[in-house]
Amino acid sequence: MAPFVHREVELAELTRWWSDPSAGAALLWGRRRVGKTALLQRFSDTTAPERTIFHTGAGRPAPAELQQLSRAVPPALRGVRDLTSRPFTDADDLLDHLAREAQDEPVLLVLDEYPELLRSVPELSGILRAFLDRPASRGVRVLLCGSAVRSMAELQEERSPLFGRFGLRLQLHPFAPHEVSALLPDLAPVERAQVHALLGGMPLYLSWWDTGDDLAGNLRRLATRPGGLLLTEGDLLLATEVERGEQPAAVLQAIAAGKTKHQEIKAWVGAEPSRTLDRLVELRLIERIVPVTEDPRRTRRRSYRIADNFLAFHLGLLGRYRPEIERGLGESILPVLLESLDDASGPPWEVAVREHVRRLAADGRFGDGVVAVGPWWRGDGTDEIDVVALAGRQRTPVLVGEVKWRREVDGDRLVRTLRTKAAGLDVDVEELRYLVAAREEVRLRSEEAVVVTAADVFA
């Protein structure tokens, strides 16, 4: 199991909510495997370890859900009732019992996978609304959690019975590149960069990586054996994260195959993909990319990339060899897979460097007022610049950068190339700062530039 690291901001938000008896209910959501349960367990352990009821909905019939929930009530909250022989009969019975137990000390009720509970008890949201509107509910802190992003979003809409009842709404995301290091402490920064390029920031995926084994050994175990975790997890991700009927797999396959423009995707899937693209962006499985100098609400110059590193690896490089891996050719495919990793690792490294630049900008490294960091390219698709930082109300370019997934690069040559490309930004190239990124070393002799390596991003 992955160690519990980071999440300090989320824990602080939950603690603030717990400390305010008038804050109403709380809502926590995020993709499966992102660490919601671990966060809630840590939160309850530090706030009310003996006064927490933690129940995970499983779509059981309502009596079975109530019986399971009754078993989850800790001894300190059972009072005089024998919940083994007399489990809760309905949701009102449960909430009335907790209200009595919370008269002197607050009680935390965590309902995990809440959309599954609604399948068993469709009226539960209405019952919770009526309960939360009663003064007697103040001592019962209700926290709803779920992985179905759309269903959790619907709980916040005006038509929902629980609309306006949430004092805290918290979405949990995968770890950022700089946070991955805490989960891979035994690896060198370059090795962390490689693992992140393949697995992204999902805590569970990172916990599968054996830091005592090398790259080949891990891929042999996880990816090139029939039934390997990285082979099967991608199927589970696709099956559980996106609702049926929206051709998500076809759209993702198109993007993985290099069809990144809207019309290219439409031709690949043979249908209008706009709704599916919007859903996949909402789920953060894909990212809509526009030149950083343009307004994303208005520009038609946009493309798409798979934003989840693991999914990009699963559908792209690994997907290319999967049929033969399942037929037993994995050991023969492994060296070919290893030789192809650089092609798959470049785009995630570029994104990680942009995220690092945002962190530097937030710390004032490039002056005050940086308002955007992103890629840029000309209208005809040429002269692409990997990193452009804009500053001020006029969104003036202040930094441009080139990112390479190579062990070492000639920084002077890349800066000269950047100067030529930056002429298309309509800015004095002498006023710009320049950035060059490589995995291990940037050689600089005469040019001045900000240097970024894996040791900086994955320190």
Image: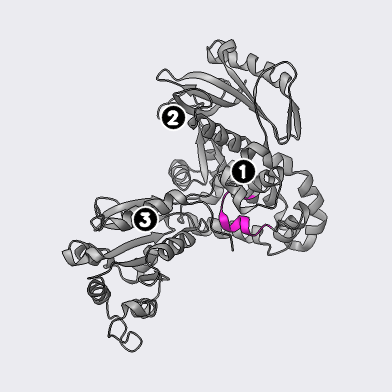
Q: Which residue is mark 1?
A: 256
Q: Earlier in the sequence, mark 2 or mark 3?
A: 3
Whole-percent x and y of residue 157? 28, 50
Q: Secondary structure at mark 2?
A: loop
Start and end of the magenta stretch? 199-209
Marks 2/3: CA distance? 36 Å
Pick the front one: 160 or 329: 160
Task: Identify which amino acid the numbered label 3 is placed on.
Answer: Thr
Q: Earlier in the sequence, mark 1 or mark 2?
A: 1
Marks 1/2: CA distance? 22 Å
102 w.r.t. 301: above or below:
below
Whole-percent x and y of residue 365? 53, 27
Q: Which residue is mark 3?
A: 15
Using the rendered image of the protein, determine whether residue 272 is visible from the camera's viewpoint: no
Q: Is residue 425 left or right of residue 56?
A: right
User: Which of label 1 and label 3 is nearer to you?
Assistant: 3
Whole-percent x and y of residue 313? 65, 48
Pick the front one: 212 or 264: 212
Task: Identify which amino acid the numbered label 1 is placed on.
Answer: Ala
Q: Earlier in the sequence, mark 1 or mark 3?
A: 3
Q: Secondary structure at mark 1?
A: helix
Whole-percent x and y of residue 155? 31, 55
Q: Which residue is mark 2?
A: 296
Q: Is residue 80 left or right of residue 174?
A: left
**Could you tell me if the residues under marks 1 and 3 are in contact, i.e. CB atoms within 8 Å?**
no
